[in-house]
Structure formats: C-alpha cells, structure tokens
Amino acid sequence: MQLQQLGTPLTLLLLAVFFGGTFLISLSISRKRENADDYMTAGNHVGFGVSAASMTATWIWASSLYASATSGYTYGISCPIHYGLWGALMILFIYPFGKRIRTLAPHASSLAEILNARHGTSSQLILAGSNILGSTLSLTSNFIAGGALIAMLSPLSFSTGVAIIASGVLLYTLWSGLRASILTDFIQVCAMLGAVVIVVPTIFFAAGGPAIFEAGATHLTAEQQSFFSSEAFLNQGAPYIAAVLAYAIGNQTIAQRLFAVRPDKIKATFVTATIGYGTTVIGVGMLGVLALYLGVEPMNGDVNNLVPQLAAEYLGVAVLCIFFVMVIGSMASTADSDLSALSSIMMTDVYGRNIAASDRPDPRLMLLIGRATMIVATGAAVYFASARFNILELLVLVGAIWGALVFPVIASFYWNKVSNMAFTVSVLAALAVFFPVRFGWIALEGPVAFVSDLLAVIGVGVIAGLMAFGFFGPRVGRIAGILAAIAVLPFGMGFLHEYTVLTASLLAYAVSMLLCVAISWRSSEDFDFTRIAQATGRFDDGEDFDLAPVAATQGRPT
Amino acid sequence: MTNLALSFYILVWPMIVAIVLGVLVRAFVSELRAARREGRPLI
C-alpha cells in the first residue's frame, strides 16, 4: 500500500503555522496582570459563539475521532451513531444540571469547589482527585495521539512529535489560562469542522463513491450491515449510556466552560455543542465504515491507524494537510482544556479552599500555582506518553469510576438532606463494589450473580431516572427510573452479569444511590443552598486588570 | 439499503457539520463586532 507522507519541512511548517497562530491569538488577549478568577472562568460572561465552539472543540479529541472510526470498522454501519450520539448526549444531559449549578454558584471555578461549600473538604477532594486523574490521562492520551500521527504522516519520530505538541500547547495556554483556551478553541473548531466537511466526502469519492457499497458488501457480516445491530448496541451503545452522566459530571473541562458562559446562553451553547460534537464524530466514524466496505487491513494490526491510513492513501498533499491540521486541532483543543482544568483545580481546590482556607488567598500566588501546575502536568504527560501506557483503557476506567460520583453529586445540588457523611460513604462504598467486579476479583456466579443483576437493574433505573429528572423534574424522574428498571428486569436478571464492564458501572450507580438515599433519608441536615453562592469564587477582587495586550504595553506603566 | 441511501448516510454528517460551522462562525463574528463597537474585550 502506497501511503502519502508530508515530509519534514512541510510538517514543521504546518505545526509552526498552527501553534504560532494560536500563540499570537493568545497573545492578543493576554494581560500584563492576569486576574486569577478570569484565568479559571474567563469572566463568567463569554458569548454563545465562543462558548459553543469551545465546548465542541473540547469534547472532540483525537481519541474520539479514532475510536468512532474503529467502532464503524468493527461493528458496522450503525456503530458510529452508537458512539457519537451518546457521546454528544453527555453534553446535552449536563445542561439542566448545569443551569442549576450556575444558579447556586454563579462565580464558582470548579464543581469540587461547590462540593466544598456544600459538604466540606473530603467530598471536595474526592471529586477534585478524580478530576486530576482524568485530566492528566486525557492530556497524555492527546500527546500520544499527536505523536503517533506525526510519526505516521512524516519522517519525524514519535518522541519528537510528542515534544512539539506538548511545547506548542503549553506555549499558548500558560499565560492566560482558560481565556486563551476558549478563544483558540474557536480557531481549532473551525479547522476540525472544516476538515470533516472536506475530508470525508473527498475520501468517499476518491475510494470509488457509491460503487464501494456494491463491491464491498461481501466484507460485512449481516450484523455489520444492520442498522439495528444488537452487537453494536451491547458492545458500544449500552456501556456509553452508562457513562453519559459520569463523564459530564466528572470532567472539569465541561464544568469550566459551564462557569464561563453567559447564563442566558447556557442552553444554546449546550445544544449547539451537542449537535456539533455528534455530527463531527459520527462523520469521522463513517471513515471506519468505508474502511470496512473497502476491506482495509489496519496497519500493524492497530485499528487506531485506520483514519490516518485512509487519509494517507486517498488524499492528495493539500487535503492531507487539512486532515493533519484537523487531528492536531482536536488534540490541542482538548489538551489546552485539560491544562486549564488542572490549573483551576490546583488553584481553587488545593490552594484557595484548603491551604489558604483560613487566610485570604493571594491571587498572584494562585496564578503562579496555576502556571506551575500546567508546566508540571505537561512534563508528567510527556513522560507517561513516552512510556506508551495504554492510556485510553485507563481513561475509560476513570470514566467508569466517575459513575460512583454521579448520584451523590447531583443529589447534593438538589436535596438539602444529603450530608457529607452520606456523600463520602456512598461514593467510597460504590467504588469498593466497582473495583472487584470490574477486574474480576469476585466471580459473578450463583447468589452473587443474582444480587449483582438485581443491583445492575437498579443501576439502569438510576441512570434513566437522573436523565429524566434533569429535564422534567423529580416526579417524572422517579417514574422514569422505576419504569426503566421494571422494563429491564425480565431480561437483565441472569444476563447482565455476563457483561462485567457494564455491570461494574451499573453497580456503582446503584450502590451510591441506595446508600446516599438511605443515609440522607433520616438525616437532620437542612442545608441552605443560598450559602453556596457566598462561599464560592471571587478570589481576585482587588485592583482591576490591564486590558491592553502585553505586546502593546511592554515598557510602559499600566 | 440502496447504494444511494448509503451514500446519503455517509455524506449527510459532513453536511450537518457545515451548517453547525456556519452557525458558530456567524455568532463569533457578531460577538466580535459587538465587542469592538462597545470597546470591550471579546473575552
């Protein structure tokens, strides 16, 4: 197979233009004296266009593009929808909870900070710790994807690629934090979405157009040709439904954009990002379906090579450059969001609300901590990337762990009887059940399998109930949860425990819900939610900042 | 499913992406103009 390559000078030129351009954009909004709150939330007043673009760009990352194509290649024509639709709904389903969170804490910097105001330190640090783990793994995964892409499409090595990507992202994010991240996201989303508009049809027609389906039908099984493939649903769709709320609640990058957007634009932002993410990822997933029809064998047996492989085979140099920028853009936009999220958590949850809790936090020290966090996180991610750990599997694991947090976190924002004890005990107990099941330390047989299936069915009810609750309120939520559990009961019993990954997630939902409700039910706690707004955000309300760009003010007093 | 329908299924996603991109660019330009008109930073 003849694969097109870009050559070292062209690759370096593209990277220089991409990262140089984003750096200049970041420079144009930089301030000589950054404001610590704006560094984390961009002023809580960002408009629809920038917010929706940023939310879309952040949620699309290189791994999701590759994984969507892999799902299409593995399970056939319906699977990119199972991948992209549920991933997109992760954004949509956080919207109603996001509105509630912004009402309770208009100026918060992180979800964990709100939990600190609601419950105290232990709950805050459980969420913040999981956020740090998730963002570090996500950062590493993006560096690996970038390094692998550069190694495949150019003569440059994987390590060189990782080093260039890491330096480029750090360069433009370091000074202005989230403000730089969300503004550059707009440029990156234009590159990504524009590339999908051009690359997918170009590969389709270059590979033979509609005739592909006639000549290649023999490469597909009946399941792969079906729009209603149960294999595709059970292996891709169902585990994703379980993860929908978990990722949205556990991921600080989404929360940070929720705190940045103008309150009246939250709905428009979330809906647009849902459609933008879904269609982009499903569109790239169609490349996997095309690869299946074309009978493409993934290079070195690695299905992650499918998309770059198709691009290298069917695209000319010009469109290949567009494809290259698309993947670099998807990776950089998520990586800069991860850096901003990590810095925000360290600034707020570690320093602002704990180390400096008794004194007034120093905004300048906060900024220093934020920037130092970005440098340390980049170094750690480059190290992990060079070791080539299977990061994606770890990230999926973290996503499943977040399942233990979903019910206690959401309940804490609505139910005044949830105490710190209820939160902490329910999360830790759910994790204690999750790990042995997920890693097969407990054999799901006999009575254990029966109890596991019963709890898993309750877990299905919890997920359905929470989804309905967000949009339609507690009554509909309870009814939807009970109906979903009853509907799944007949075929879930004796069946669900065979899918341990799915079962472990469902058990986490069920156990955390049962314990959180049981402990809170008789609790004397009567939390006043208005206290949250006063106890969150506003670390830096001193002298206002200089609005002029650094470039224009160097050497002059501001 | 016919070849035509499958072709549409493959190509409809980039078409929707193009519409979303148009919405985002239009909103961004409008916000940028408003910010310049009012003399405040976009972010």
Image: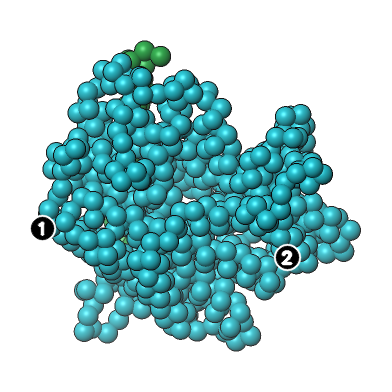
Chain colours: A cyan, B green
- Residue at mark 1: chain: A
Are discs 2 and 1 both within one chain? yes
- Tell me if residue B16 can be seen: no
Q: Residue at 33% of width from left, 26% of height from top? A: A293
Residue type, label 1? Pro
N-term-proximal mark, 2 vs 1: 1
Q: Which residue is mark 1?
A: A9
Residue type, label 2? Thr
Q: Is disc 2 placed on a helix, strand or loop?
A: helix
- Residue at mark 2: chain: A
Q: Which residue is mark 2?
A: A424
Give the class, few, some or many, for how many residues have Cα within 10 Å of label 2's Cα (few <14, many ≥20). many
* A246 left or right, relative to A147: right
Q: Is disc 1 placed on a helix, strand or loop?
A: helix
Where residue A5 appears, as percent x and y from the top left, is: 15, 47
Above or below, A341 against A90 in this view is below
Q: Residue at 54% of width from left, 37% of height from top? A: A235
- Tell me if residue A253 can be seen: yes
